[in-house]
Image (cartoon, rainbow, N blue to C red):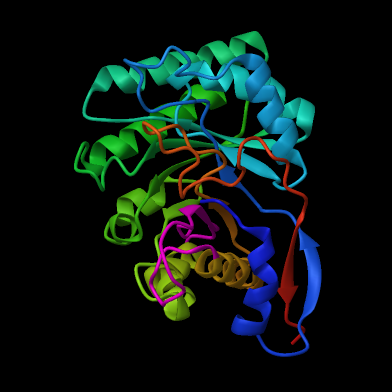
Amino acid sequence: MKLFLSTFAATVAFALNEGAHALNVKIPGVIYTARNSMNQDNDSAYCKSAAEVEEDMIALANSVERVRITSLTDCNQAELVLPAAKKAKVFVMLGLWTSNNPDQFAAEKAKLGSLMDSGLYDNNVIAVCVGNEAVHRGEIPIATAITYVNETRDFIRERGHDTQVTVAETPDVLENSGDLMDAVDFFAINVVPDTYIFDSMVSVLNQIRALRGYARGRKKFISLTQTGWSSGGNGFNAGVAHPQNQARYFAELYQFTTWMDVQFYWYQAFVPKWGEQLPGPYDQCEEDVLLPPIQIPIVLI
């Protein structure tokens, strides 16, 4: 979701109390893909080169603290992202893609092993996320998701690493499975504010309210592993995808998650090409333009 920095000034006057003070901040995290295009069969430049990935990490380093990838094997991106991110001093949450095809997980796990064997996997990897809404999509049952998490954790521990392991799911999936909550090292929640912009933070809080209690009871923390607000659309009305609505959501999300001590990952860093739609509504950088640290209003309470 593209961040239009020029709209933040308008957002201050519209959204927050008078007397708010500005503070330069970095985005806690963004979702990244090494895809240039979603048209794999028709685009010879479907995947980014190592040089392009390095350029992306350098560009993002001024604006973000962490990147999250949802697959190791897609475009061989883990092998490209890990050295580039480390060079740019950006932390990485690795992701293994899971689906109804068991070979998918096997391939992702094999790639994880090769990353460790080659020395690319080190302390710059802050977490490993095994799956991204595969249960929500109905592709695997919860029992399989738990098996994948436990198998991946054992695999990592056997190689001498203590990286935390989890699975990213929607709030309802996690909330309705005590076994899944017990299996993960922390709660990784993908949350979408399906409401008017004025109620967006209420929507987010309502979706994770019960999970906050479950997390405290298990002495685990919560990470919003995917969230955002689309910049596409016409007009500035509640519920509309628009740069000003997006700016308001980002500003309020930042303050809300800071207050709760919760990290979030914005969806997403760069949007792959969909036909002629580039850039689209879901990107943080436009045409490789470097964004500075973002200035948002911080209300002093």
Is 214 above or below relative to 17?
above
Q: Position of residue 66 (x, y in %)?
A: 66, 42
In this rendered view, identify the residue nearer to me: 49 or 149.
49
**Quadrant of image for the C terminus:** bottom right
Is residue 159 at least partly visible in the picture?
no
Q: Position of residue 155 (x, y in %)?
A: 48, 22
Segment colored magenta: 218-243
Q: Residue at x 69, y 32 (%)?
A: 57
In this rendered view, identify the residue nearer to me: 81 or 245.
245
Residue 15 picture quarter: bottom right
* Residue 72 in the figure: left or right of residue 175: right
Residue 233 in magenta stretch: yes
- In the rendered image, the residue lying farthest to the bottom is 18
Is 300 above or below relative to 220?
below
Q: Residue at x 53, y 68 (%)?
A: 249
Q: Main secondary structure of the magenta part?
A: loop
* Residue 256 in the figure: left or right of residue 5: left
Is 96 above or below relative to 241?
above
Q: Position of residue 285 (x, y in %)?
A: 62, 43
Q: Residue at x 55, y 26 (%)?
A: 157
In this rendered view, identify the residue nearer to me: 284 or 263.
284
Is residue 207 at least partly visible in the picture?
yes
Q: Residue at x 80, y 62 (%)?
A: 24
